[in-house]
Image: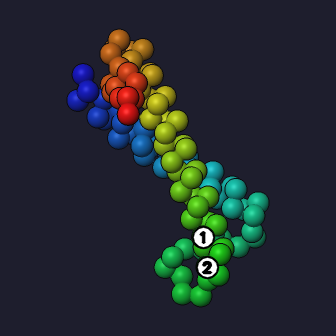
Amino acid sequence: MKLAFVPVSIVSGLVAGQLAKKLFDFIWGRIDDEDAPQPKHRRIALPKLALALVIEGALFRLVKGFTDHGARQGFAKATGSWPGEEEPEPA
């Protein structure tokens, strides 16, 4: 059943990436009037780059995690089988 989840995971990952990008652009627009700095730019303020990268990374991880979990819940409702572990292994 885990193999059947692979296409769902791929599509939900792509959707999550696009959603996270739009959310980042919206948030960055509230922080600064200019586009967010990118590492490829030569003349940028490093603190501004750091802030942009931290926000972008955190948003991507958050959106990806929620999207992945939601896709797994939908898959489980549709098939009756959870595509993953029920809970984390004890430490």
**Tag shown at residue 28:** none
In screen coordinates, is 83 left or right of 70? left
Q: Which amino acid does label 1 sit on?
A: Ala
12 or 48, which is in the foreground? 48
Q: How many marks?
A: 2
List x then y, in percent, for residue 36: 63, 70
Relative horizontal placement of residue 2, taking residue 17 as reference (left or right) = left
Q: Which residue is drawn at 60% across and 73% down?
A: 49
In the rendered image, residue 61, in percent from the top left (x then y), is placed at 51, 48
Neighbourhood count class around disc 2 (C-alpha, 10 Å): few under 14, some 14–19, many 20 upward: few
Q: Indicate the position of residue 41 as horizontal and vertical percent values.
A: 54, 82
Residue at left offset 65%, top offset 81%:
45
In three-dimensional space, the C-alpha distance between marks 2 and 1, rounded to whole angstroms, equals 6 Å
Name the colour scheme: rainbow
Q: Name the residue under label 1.
A: 50
In the image, residue 67 sits, relative to residue 73, either above or below, namely below
Q: Is the N terminus in the top left, top right, bottom left or bottom right quadrant?
A: top left
State whether residue 21 appears in this view: no
Residue under the point 49% across and 36% down: 67
Residue corresponding to mark 2: 46
Q: Nearer the viewer, residue 57 or 34?
A: 57
Question: Does residue 84 lie above or below 31 as drawn?
Answer: above
Q: In this view, does 50 lie above or below 79?
A: below
The disc labelled 2 sits on which kind of residue?
Answer: Leu
| Tag 2 near tag 1, CB within 8 Å | yes
The quarter of the picture where the C terminus appears is top left
Q: In the displayed image of the protein, which residue is found farthest to the front? A: 91
Let me know if residue 89 appears in the view.
yes
